[in-house]
Image (cartoon, helix red, strand yellow):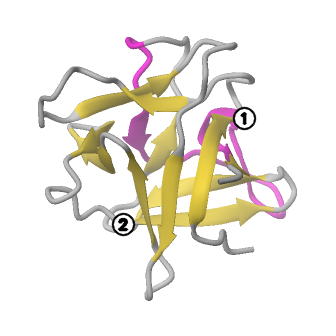
Amino acid sequence: MSLPSGAYIINSLGSPGGSYLARESGDTLLPKKVFVLPPGTEAPTWVVTQLDNGRYKLETGDGSAGVIDGKVYAIGVLESREQWILTYQDLQGAYTVERASQEEGWVAPDGIGPDAQLESRPLIVMPSEPPQYLPSELFIFSPVEQ
């Protein structure tokens, strides 16, 4: 099931009530960490754009999702060329988010807040049929009404 382009709130299946946000740090153009928000915090909107090749671009107001040293950042939109593969895992009811350029994907850290930055690393696939992923590797994209 492909995800249509649009505005979404992204939640980690491994952190109920947590969502992801590029940390605001004024008007700087430096990359901003993407981290799990504490429950009850207003969730930011992500713009998901499906590209002609079936891959996706993921953006917040702070920039486009990209990876630096194994961590996920919102990078100035003109600087990040990162493309993502979103795969719906039917049995688990959520998506894996994998880098198109490497064999790794989003992994939610333990904890919440600015120090709990989203990572990009090889995903762990549990030996089952169909394959299953850890909750920290699964994400729910909830459409935002505009």
Q: Which residues are magenta?
A: 114-140
Q: Residue at x 45, y 30 (%)?
A: 21
Question: Considering depth in this image, is 131 or 78 the residue closer to the camera?
Answer: 78
Above or below, 145 against 42 in this view is: below
Q: Is residue 118 magenta?
A: yes
* Precedes in sequence: disc 2 or disc 1: 1
Residue 135 picture location, percent across and down: 71, 35
Kind of residue indicated by mark 2: Gln
What residue occupies the far front of the structure in this picture?
A: 146
- Quarter of the image where one finds residue 62: top left
Residue 71 vs residue 91: left or right? Answer: left
Above or below, 103 against 118 in this view is: below
Badge 1 is on which residue?
13
Q: Quadrant of the N terminus?
A: bottom right
Residue 44 vs residue 104: left or right? Answer: right
Q: Quadrant of the C terminus?
A: bottom right
Above or below, 62 against 129 in this view is: above
Residue 13 picture location, percent across and down: 72, 35
Badge 2 is on which residue?
83
Kind of residue indicated by mark 1: Leu
Residue 8 vs residue 88: left or right? Answer: left
Q: Residue at x 23, y 45 (%)?
A: 75
Residue 55 picture location, percent across and down: 46, 75
- Quarter of the image where one finds residue 70: top left
Residue 118 vs residue 143: left or right? Answer: left
Q: Residue at x 68, y 74 (%)?
A: 2
Q: Is residue 88 magenta?
A: no
Mark linked to residue 43: none
